[in-house]
Image (cartoon, rainbow, N blue to C red):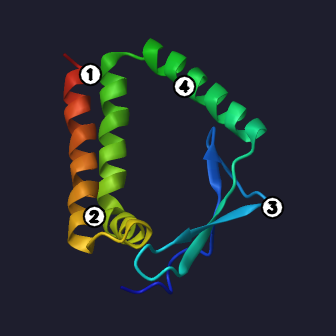
Amino acid sequence: MHTDTLPQHVPLLIDGQWIQTNEQVPSCNPYTGKTAFFVSECTDELLDQALAAADKAKFATGKMPARDRADLLRRAAQGIRQHSESIARIMAIETGKPLTDALTEVLRSAETFELSAQEAVR
């Protein structure tokens, strides 16, 4: 598994904005014990911002027509499938699970979004 293309520092995504914090938490491979990359640490203030953004998004999507919600869910599924190999690779490194198992889990996530899109219009 190639680690040269992994990000060195992973920012937080809050309300559509990538936020890099000064404090970083190592993400280690449980089998090797080696740090694969660092993730920005979330402060209480950033957590409050993320929760407020989620609440705002919940309200906004609740007002959307079902067709638009379904489209949003389908686009999420498409994005997961488009990046499935890199998501699975990162998951395998973080959890120590085999890459094939991680890829199966990622693709199942995309399928869940597709099924949710179908339910959104019912």
Q: Which residue is mark 4?
A: 57
> Residue at 30% across / 50% down in the picture?
78
Q: Which residue is mark 2?
A: 102
**Rendered image quadrant of residue 27:** bottom right
Q: Which residue is mark 3?
A: 22
Considering every residue shown, the one lying at the far right of the view is 22
> Residue at 25% across / 30% down in the picture?
116
**Rendered image quadrant of residue 92:** bottom left
Are the residues flagged by discs 1 and 4 in contact, CB closer than 8 Å?
A: no
- Tell me which label, 4 or 3, sits earlier in the chain: 3
Locate residue 26, reporting x and y percent.
Answer: 62, 69
Mark 1 is surrounded, within 10 Å at the Cα level, by few (under 14), some (14 to 19) or many (20 or more) other residues, namely some
* Of marks 1 and 2, the one in the foreground: 2
Q: Is residue 47 left or right of residue 117?
A: right
- Tell me which label, 3 or 2, sits earlier in the chain: 3
- Disc 4 from disc 3: Cα separation: 27 Å
Q: Which residue is mark 1?
A: 120
Locate residue 74, reporting x and y percent.
Answer: 29, 39
- Disc 3 from disc 1: Cα separation: 40 Å
Mark 4 is surrounded, within 10 Å at the Cα level, by few (under 14), some (14 to 19) or many (20 or more) other residues, namely few
* Of marks 3 and 1, the one in the foreground: 3
Q: Amino acid at mark 4?
A: Ala
Q: Amino acid at mark 2?
A: Ala
Mark 2 is surrounded, within 10 Å at the Cα level, by few (under 14), some (14 to 19) or many (20 or more) other residues, namely many
Local secondary structure at mark 3: loop
- Disc 3 from disc 2: Cα separation: 30 Å
